[in-house]
Structures are given as structure tokens and as C-alpha cells.
Amino acid sequence: MSTIDVDFYFDFGSPNAWIAHALMPAAAQRSGLRFHYRPMLLGGVFQLIGNRPPMQQFADIPSKLSWFRREMERFVKRHGVPFEFNPHFPVNTLKLMRGAVLFQDSDQFFPYLDTCFHNMWVQPKNLGDEEILGAVLASAGFDTDAFFEGITRPDVKQALIEATDTAVARGVFGAPTFVVGEEVYFGKEQLFDLEADLSRDAPAPA
């Protein structure tokens, strides 16, 4: 099975990004996909392209908002993904996403991902509150002093800005988004379309 590289653009504030994250390890095993996590600030994406979060888009259409919530409930039940909608939604994820940039090239990156996603969408907390975020990270074994100092570094702030700009330049307009070359797949459901397309296009064994 050949390995295919996939860029995964995410923000912890997206419930669908959590669901995709939970399903990606199995997809990688099934299809030989290698996912590269690309942090971005979803609010920054929306500002750059003039998009709005789904909850705002659906605010004037109660039936669509009801469908959106119910569809998510059906999806996580069907695929066995633990999920509880965060009562503090929408949560300001600026510090969280700067943290993802801070840890991106270290062995703390995936423990950090799992900690933030779990405390956002499995046992939801208001991670936009610095005191709560600090307690969550401390309980997971992170050095909180180093974390809060690190996310104020100019290079970390600039890296997140540049990552968000790059996401938009590649056609990203929301989260989660999978990008393979020039192909853009948006949404948790498209993970399966991505698998199917890449499996079909993969070269046959010699």
C-alpha cells in the first residue's frame, strides 16, 4: 500500500474537526493516508474570506439549525465517536491554536491535540478561559508557565497568522478541510470520499 500525504486543516473550535480527528487513525490504517496537521485560526479564515460560522448562517432558519445538530448526533453515533456539544460554544480558540503552533514540531503535539479536543468536545469545558485552560493542561502534565509564555512569542503569533493565510490561499474556507495537492475536501463526511478517490487513483501494484 502506497502512502499518500494529506494536509488536515483544523481549529479546536470546530466540532467536526474533532470528529474527523477521531476517525483519521482508522482511515490511515485502511488507506495508507499520512495526515499532516495544519493549525489555523478559523475566525481568521472567516474574516479573510467573508464566511460565517454555521451557527450564524443557520440562525434565521431554525429547521436547518435543528438538522445540523441532529445530523452530527447521528454521525457520531454511527461511527462510535464520543461527543458532547460544548455548552460554551463558540469558544475563543486563539490561545489554543497558538499552542498548536508552539508544539507542532515537538513530541508534545499529539498529546496536546488529544487534550484540547477531549476537553472541548468529549468532556467540554470553556477552554477560552485562561484559568480553566491552565488547569486542564496542568492536569495533563504540561508546563503551563512555559505554555503561556510560549504562546505570547512573536514568532508563534506570526506563524499562526501565516498558517491561516496559507490555508486560505489553498482554498480552505472552514474546518475540517483535507487538502491533497490542488484537491480540497471540506467536512468530516468527505474523509470517506477522500479515501475512496485516493484509493481509486492509486497506482496498481507492480
Image: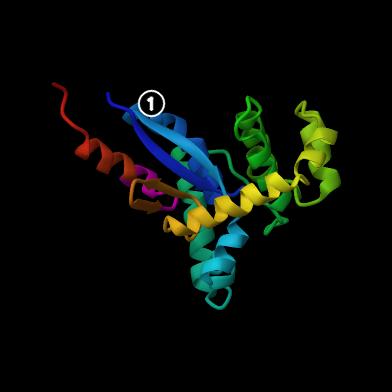
The answer to which quarter of the image holds residue 134 is top right
In the current view of this chain or complex, which residue is farthest to the bottom?
60
Residue 14 appears in the rendering: no
Q: Is residue 188 magenta?
A: yes
User: Which percent across, then down, holds residue 172?
Assistant: 46, 57
Q: Is 133 on the left or on the right of 199, as rendered?
A: right
According to the picture, the residue beneath numbered tag 1 turns out to be 29
Depth check: give the residue in front, 167 or 30: 167
Task: Name the residue located 77 percent from the left edge and 39 percent from the top edge.
Answer: 150
Q: Is residue 166 above or below residue 80?
A: below
Q: Secondary structure at mark 1?
A: helix
Q: Is 170 on the left or on the right of 11, as rendered?
A: left
Q: Is residue 6 above or below residue 107?
A: below
- Give the magenta part as a residue range: 186-193
Q: Is residue 81 magenta?
A: no
Task: Name the residue located 33 percent from the left edge and 44 percent from the top edge.
Answer: 194
- The amino acid beneath tag 1 is Gln
User: Which percent across, then down, holds residue 19?
Assistant: 52, 43
